[in-house]
Image (spheres, rainbow, N blue to C red):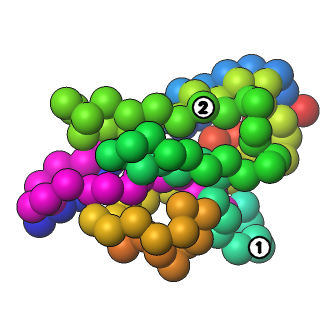
Amino acid sequence: QGQLVESGGGSVETGGSLRLSCAASGYRGNLQCMGWFRQAPGMEREGVASIRTTGGNTFYADSVKGRFTISQDNAKNTVSLQMNSLKFEDTAMYYCAAVFWCGDLSKVTDFAYWGQGTQVTVSS
């Protein structure tokens, strides 16, 4: 049975950096799209950054463009999210997501598999 395991969350001050990683294991086939979503208390889950693992097409939410970078390591079935210049409003639970067949890289409903989440807290 496949699973996505996130790591790298934590607490940081405004302007700081964190790197999240997501390791996929146990899936039978290639996960063609992987991404990061986040959900703050009382808010809907939203797309942050996603990548097409074959081809490298990416999606970034407008709020993180220029600050966050998604990358992949196909050999390790890992996707990472480098987050720089963090803001208070980046505080949320961050979830790794994946799907075998890509749809809209920004849509929660187009991803089939989800990790348990890792908390990112940015203090002002």
Task: Determine whether, in the image, residue 69 is placed left or right of residue 53.
Answer: right
Task: Determine whether, in the image, residue 121 is placed left or right of residue 69.
Answer: right
Instruction: Determine the residue positioned at 28% across, 65% down.
Output: 100
Determine the main secondary structure of the stretch shown in magenta.
strand
Q: Which mark is residue 34?
A: none
Residue 42 image position (x, y, % from top left): 77, 73
User: Tag count in the figure?
Assistant: 2
Instruction: Determine the residue positioned at 71% across, 24% down.
Output: 84
**Residue stretch rendered in magenta on the structure:** 21-39
Tell me which numbered mark, 2 or 1, is placed earlier along the sequence: 1
Q: Which residue is mark 1?
A: 42
Quarter the C terminus occupies:
top right
Amino acid under disc 2: Thr
Contact between labelled residues 1 and 2, with CB atoms less than 8 Å apart: no
Q: Quadrant of residue 16?
A: top right
Instruction: Determine the residue positioned at 76% across, 30% down.
Output: 66
Amino acid under disc 1: Gly
Evaluate whether residue 54 shows in this view.
yes
Q: Which residue is mark 2?
A: 69
